[in-house]
Amino acid sequence: MDSLVGVSPQRILFHGPTKLLVDNYHWHSPEVGIVASYTPKERDVHDHFGIFRGVDQIESFAQATIVSCGTFLGCVKQGCTPEDLRQKFTPIFISVGHVVFQNYLEKGDTFVCIGRITFSKFRQMTCDGRIYKVPKDIDPDAYFADFSEERLMGYELSSDFVLVSELFDITGRAIKNEYFIK
Amino acid sequence: MERQEIVDGLVEVLKTVRTIDPERLKNVTEETDFKADLNAPSTELINIAAKVEHKFGVEFEDDDIDELGTTVKDVVDLILKAKARQSA
């Protein structure tokens, strides 16, 4: 595969169904960044005022960016499948640099995580990016079909996308499974 | 390349790392520990390794970094190992 566009996140992310916070990949340039979306379900807002939690925004962004992009590059480098990689490594959070929340998301609000890779080496990846609420009348697949690296770098979206949060230095690393105590 | 020459070059790299207090770099030896003595966050070690590659013109393997210890000696050893691998 050349990119993650059109690939089911369930093939890339091995989180269980209640913890998987990416629905679709819409645009991907392996060395540069990614656009992925998620729509919060009832379970995601349960016991939280009907609002998708800020920490889950960060988790969703991390899954969409550092885990998805890191897994893709790891598979390319090792010439293997995500399943093969999963047998050897587990993705972990290393650090969250800085996050600014500007708006909120409710159940049914589709949002896109727009991530830019700022560091990728030694199985560690750092991304900056933004989360935007997608206008109800826009199909993200069609909208991002002709997206580009230039538009990614400038977060060039139509004005009806609502900025929800800005994320900086979101860092994760693939750790060998043998380092975990089972 | 002498080990002390590598330590000196490593100190130059460490001076560019904003999370490390320059005051702590005055008496760096091979026994200096990045975490305990220089108070470097674990995330910084990967960035330091990337800068060291560039500084010394070597290339580390992913597994090298997984197995890397936290002292200056560990990095010096790794640089020499990478250089030997390159010239093999």
Image (cartoon, grey):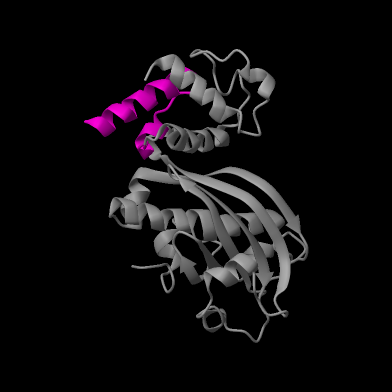
Q: Is residue B60 shown left or right of residue A131?
A: left
- All told, the count of numbered labels is 0
What residue do we see at 44% from left, 21% from top?
B6
* Position in image of residue A154 (x %, y %): 64, 68
Frontmost residue, B61 versus A71: B61
- Seen from the viewer's position, the closer of residues B12 and B61 is B12
Q: In the image, A113: left or right of A124?
A: right
Residue B80 shown in magenta:
yes
Q: Residue at x 21, y 31 (%)?
A: B88
Instruction: Provide residue A58's location: percent of width, then percent of height.
Output: 64, 55
Q: Is residue B66 above or below residue A138?
A: above
Q: Which residues are magenta?
A: B59-88
Q: Position of residue A4 (x, y in %)?
A: 42, 67
**Furthest residue toward left:** B88
In this view, A11 is above or below A93: below
- Which one is nearer the viewer's eye here, A130 or A81? A130
As for residue B29 lying within the magenta part, the answer is: no
The main secondary structure of the magenta stretch is: helix
